[in-house]
Amino acid sequence: MADVDINIAGRSYSIAARDGDEPHLRHLESILQKHAETAQRASGGLNAERTLVYLSLILADLVDDVQRNPPQGVSPVLLERIADRLEAVAAALEEDAAEA
């Protein structure tokens, strides 16, 4: 197991990851960062927890859109795995925020 420090919406989180999953977590971090500014604006910048809720809603909306309009050649199983990983990352972030 390795700990990976990621930064989302201006806050750092230490995430436990299986060895070899670090590049994937960095990729997920970049996806989250891509939408973090929008989430911060939507939340009014009041607190990190509210920003994470808006970020989760943005990502859930994207997942929903893909599920309703799957691109050709993409397996629904792959989409399920992506959704499961996003949920795991969100749960870990919430846990870290609760401990902070």
Image (spheres, rainbow, N blue to C red):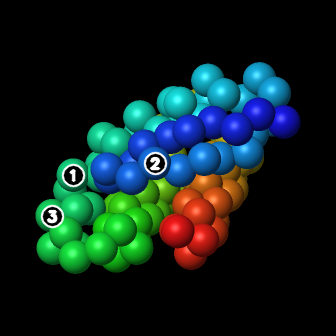
Q: CA distance from mark 1 to mark 2?
A: 15 Å
SS label for mark 1: helix
Q: Is residue 98 left or right of residue 1?
A: left
Residue in the foreground of this view, choosing between 48 and 85: 48
Residue 15 place in picture, x, y as percent: 65, 47
Q: Is residue 5 left or right of residue 33?
A: right
Residue in the foreground of this view, choosing between 97 and 55: 97
Q: Are marks 3 and 1 in contact (CB under 8 Å)?
A: yes
Which quadrant of the figure has residue 38? Answer: bottom left
Q: Is residue 51 left or right of residue 42?
A: right
Q: Residue at x 41, y 34 (%)?
A: 30
Q: Residues within 10 Å of mark 3 (few under 14, many from 20)?
A: few
Residue type highlighted by circle 2: Ser
Q: Earlier in the sequence, mark 2 or mark 3?
A: 2
Residue type highlighted by circle 3: Arg
Q: Is residue 98 left or right of residue 10?
A: right
Residue type highlighted by circle 1: Glu
Residue 37 circle label: 1
Q: Earlier in the sequence, mark 1 or mark 2?
A: 2
Q: Is residue 50 above or below residue 78?
A: below
- For the N terminus, the image quarter is top right
SS label for mark 2: strand
Residue in the foreground of this view, choosing between 91 and 59: 91
Residue 78 place in picture, x, y as percent: 68, 41
Q: Which residue carries the number 3 mark?
A: 41
Q: Nearer the viewer, mark 1 or mark 2?
A: 2
Residue 59 place in picture, x, y as percent: 42, 57
Which quadrant of the figure has residue 61? Answer: bottom left
Q: Which residue carries the number 2 mark?
A: 12
